[in-house]
Amino acid sequence: MTAQAKVKIYVSGGRHSINLPGEFVRDSTFPFKPLEELVARIDGKRVVIEKP
């Protein structure tokens, strides 16, 4: 199980992105599917990504 991964924020033009390692997203407990719409919110010093 890979419940945690180190990631970086990348900037390209006006967009920012976070790339998640393949091992992390292939874990059977990873809750999201490709192209699924998600909601990101700031919670104190954390970014929370969840299904709407």
Image: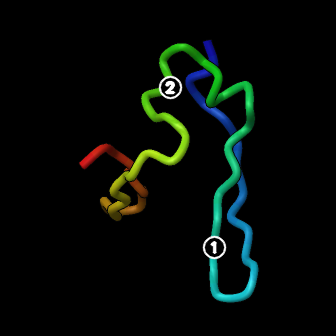
Whole-angstrom CA distance, mark 2 to mark 1, is 22 Å
- Count of numbered tags: 2
Please name the residue shown 39% across and 52% down the image: 37
Residue 24 position, x and y percent, is 65, 28
Amino acid bearing label 1: His
Residue 30, labelled with which disc? Answer: 2
Q: Residue furthest front?
A: 35
- Please tell me whether mark 1 sits on a helix, a strand or a loop: strand
- Please tell me whether mark 2 sits on a helix, a strand or a loop: loop
Residue 31 to residue 9: above or below: above
Residue 2 to residue 31: above or below: above
Quick one: label 2, few (<14), some, or many (20+) residues within 10 Å? few
Quadrant of the drawing holding the N terminus: top right
Residue 50, labelled with which disc? Answer: none
The residue carrying mark 1 is 16
14 relative position to 33: left or right:
right
Please name the residue shown 51% across and 47% down the image: 35
Nearest to the observer: residue 28 or residue 4: 28
Please name the residue shown 55% across and 40% down the image: 34
Tell me whether the residue at label 2 lies in contact with that at label 1, contact meaning CB atoms closer than 8 angstroms: no
Nearest to the observer: residue 2 or residue 50: 50
Quick one: label 1, few (<14), some, or many (20+) residues within 10 Å? few
Nearest to the observer: residue 40 or residue 42: 40
Name the N-terminal-most of marks 2 and 1.
1
Q: Residue furthest bottom?
A: 14
Residue 19 position, x and y percent, is 70, 51
Residue 12 position, x and y percent, is 75, 79
Amino acid bearing label 2: Phe
Q: Quadrant of residue 5?
A: top right
